[in-house]
Amino acid sequence: MTEHERDPALSGLFANATEDLDGESFTQAVMDETIRLRRRHRMGWIALGVVAVLMAFVMQDLVVDFSQALAHPLFTIDHRLMAEMLAPVNSIGGLLSMAVLALRLAYRRIFN
């Protein structure tokens, strides 16, 4: 690699790296920055947790309504025992599950 191919900013950093640094002040500066970043990281996680809790309260009714809609039967069966036996496949959720499994099977047959 020739001199003109080197990045001048990087070369400047290496040139400055030969200077002696005061060990105590350098260590203190690094520790202060580390503590600041750790505190900022922790506050970000706390904020994310607060937002998640607030969203959980808001989204709870929507999730309950969605799960009840998935359990809605596709057709009514008068015989109780037969209705209970077919309940997993006689629902919107069962139909969606079978559709997803069929798509997965088709994908595997096509691409494998």
Image: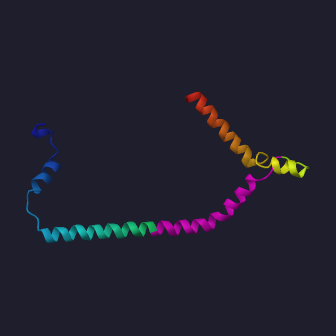
Q: Is residue 43 left or right of residue 12?
A: right
Give whichever of 44, 7 is nearer the camera: 44
**Helix, strand or loop for the magenta stretch, by majority:** helix
Instruction: Tell me which segment is drawn in magenta.
Output: 46-74
Question: Magenta segment: does it hold 53?
Answer: yes
Q: Percent position (x, y) of residue 104?
A: 62, 37
Q: Percent from the top left, x then y, of residue 20?
A: 8, 62
Nearest to the observer: residue 85 or residue 1: 85
Decide if residue 65 is on the left or right side of residue 9: right
Q: Quadrant of the N terminus?
A: top left
Q: Farthest residue toward the left?
A: 19
Q: Is residue 86 above or below residue 106?
A: below
Quarter occupied by residue 65: bottom right
How many numbered circles are shown? 0
Q: Is residue 9 on the magenta stretch?
A: no
| Left or right placement of residue 16 versus residue 76 in this view | left
Pick the front one: 90 or 42 = 90
Which quadrant would the C terminus be assigned to in this image?
top right
Q: Residue at x 77, y 45 (%)?
A: 89
Give me the residue at 66% from left, 41% from top: 100
Residue 68 spot, x, y in % from top left: 74, 57
Q: Which quadrant of the view contains residue 27?
A: bottom left
Q: Nearer the viewer, residue 10 or 100?
A: 100
- Residue 99 vertical position relative to residue 55 in the rendered view, above or below: above
Q: Residue at x 57, y 69 (%)?
A: 54
